[in-house]
Amino acid sequence: MKVCMLLHKSAAHDSRVLREARALSAAGHEVSIVQLSPPRRLPRPVFWCWLSLAFVFQVVRLRPDIVHAHDTATLPSALVGARIARARVVYDSHELSTGVPYRSRLGDALAVTVERHGLHRCAAVITVSDAIADVLRRRYSLRAQPTVVRNVPDLGRARPASGPSLRERAGAMGKPVVLYQGAASPFRGCENLVRALALVDQQTQLVFLGSSEARFTRKLRDLAQQEAVEGRVHFIASVPEEELISYAADADVGVWLLEDNCDNHRLTLPNKLFEYIASGLPVVAADLPAGGGLVRDRGVGWTVDAGDARSIADGLAGALAGRNDPALRARLRMAADDLQWSREQERLLGLYDSLAGGGGARRDPARSSLSVVALVATGLSLCLLAGCGGDPPAPADPNEQQLVEGKGRRARLTETGIAFANTASGTIGRECARRAESKAAASSPAAELREAVGDLERLYEMAPRARFRRSPGTPLVFMRDVLQATVFTLRRRSVCGGGEAQRLARRLTSVLEP
C-alpha cells in the first residue's frame, strides 16, 4: 500500500516516526513523509493555515491508500486530503492531546472537538500507552481499542558513537554521570534536577543530552550558578539517533522527571524510558502511573517525587550506590531483551495487514461534506488560537507586525509573512530514512507568492465538490483571502510590481469562478 505520513515538525529527531516508516517500508509498503520544513518566524494564523492547506495538497498529489496522521495538528488536513484522494486515515496519537500543560482550556476544548469528530472517521487509531488507549476509547466511545505501539528503540540500527564519548565530551572521566536525555524544557523536572545535584556527592556530574531552547538553557545555567554546581552541569547537543544508545550507555544513571501537572504526563510512556533500559542504565523516574509504573513493575530503578529536589536527590543517591547490584543488572538485561522494536513493530504491521485486507472503518464518500468542513474549521481554530501538538511557532516581534486588510478579512503579517512555510516529502528506504529535502528557497518574496497562488489553484481544481470549494468560511476560501491581503501588501511596499500584482489578484479572484 501507499502510505503518506503527515508530521507537523521535522522528522530528523522524531524517532517514533522514523521507526514506523522504516518498519512499514521494510514490510513492502511505499512510504512517504510530508513534514514541516525548518521553522520560520511567521504569524501564527498564516503559518498554520498555509501548513494545513499544504498538507492537503501533498496528500492529494501523492494519492496514497493510507494517510497516517501524527498527532492532532495533522488530523483535519489528513481527513480532508483522504476524502479527496479516496484514502483512509490512521491517527497516531503521540500524547494525550487534551492533557498537556502548554495548551489553554480553549485549546483543550478544540482538541476534544477535533478528536471527537475525527476519530470515528479514521480506519484505525494508534497511541503510545495502554492508559492513553483506554482514555481515548472511553472518551470517544470508539468501537475498537486503539492499537498500542510503544516508543521502544530499534537496537538493530544502533551503532557506536562516532566521536568522543559522553564522558569525554562532558569532561567527566572517572566521575559518576547522571544523564537527562532529550531537550530540556519546562514541566520536565529540569530545575529540580539541578537543585538535587547540589544535594548529592560533589563528584557527581549532570549531563543534558539534546538540543534545548536557548532561553531555557540559560535559565538552567543561571540556576546551576545559584546552587554552586555550574561546573558539574553540562549541555551536549543532540546526537544521531543510531548513536544514542552508545552515548547513553556511557552514563551511570538515567533520569525521567515529568511533573505531575497534567493527564498526559501521568499516562505517557516516552522514548527516553525505553532508551535508558536498552542502554543498561538504572532509572530515576517520576512517580507517575504509567512511566513510574513501568519502572516499578520491571524493577529497573527508583521512583521519586519530581516536584521535590530532596526526593530526587535521594533517588539519585540510591541509584548511584546500587547501580552495580547484580540483581538490578539482571532485571535491566531482561527488560531490554523484552522491550525491543523487533517485537513491538509487529503490532503496527499487524494493523496495516488488516487494513490491506479491507479492515478498518470506511466512510461513504457520497455523504455530505459539511461535517468534514466543520471539522477542518475547528482544526484550524485550534491551530490559530492555541497551537496544536508540539511547540507553536515563535511569535513575531510585535514591533515588526502590520495589520493589512483584504476582502473584508484581516491577517496579521510581518515583513517575512509572505514567505510561507514549505513542506517537503521524501521516501523512507528499506535500510535507512532519507531526510525529506526542502523545496529550493524562492529567489524573491514575489516568486514565493506566485508558487503559493499556483498551489492554491491546483488544490481548488482537485476539490471534488463546488460546494466544498466555495463555501464561505472554509479554509480554502480563508487562505485565498490571506493571499489577496499579501498581494496588497507586496504591491504597497513595491516588492511586487503593479502589473504582476494585478495578474496575481486576477488569478486569485478567478479561483472561485465556476
Image (tube, helix red, strand yellow):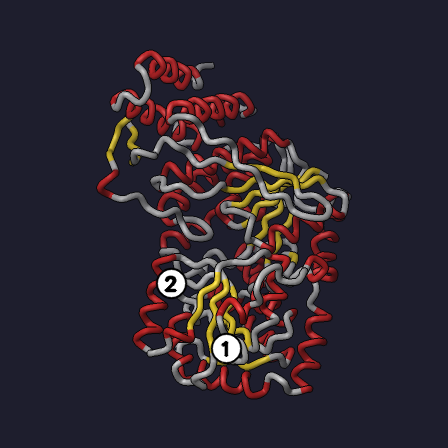
- The image shows residue 61 at horizontal and vertical percentages of 60, 29
Reply above or below: 400 against 340: above
**In this rendering, would 267 be left or right of 212?**
right
Amino acid of disc 2: Thr
Q: Quadrant of the N terminus?
A: top right
Tag 2's secondary structure?
Answer: helix
- The image shows residue 305 at horizontal and vertical percentages of 45, 79
Q: Is residue 117 visible?
A: no
Residue drawn at (39%, 26%), measured in percent from left and top?
Answer: 444
Q: Which residue is mark 2?
A: 217
**In this rendering, would 503 be left or right of 61?**
left
Residue drawn at (60%, 62%), measured in percent from left and top?
Answer: 244
Contact (CB < 8 A) between labels 2 and 1?
no
Tag 1's secondary structure?
Answer: loop
Q: Between residue 285 and residue 183, name the one nearer to us.
A: 183
Q: Is residue 417 visible?
A: yes
Residue drawn at (65%, 59%), measured in percent from left and top?
Answer: 149
Amino acid of disc 1: Asp
**Neighbourhood count class around disc 1 (C-alpha, 10 Å): few under 14, some 14–19, many 20 upward:** many
Reply above or below: 122 against 369: below
Q: Which residue is mark 1?
A: 287
Reply above or below: 78 against 246: above
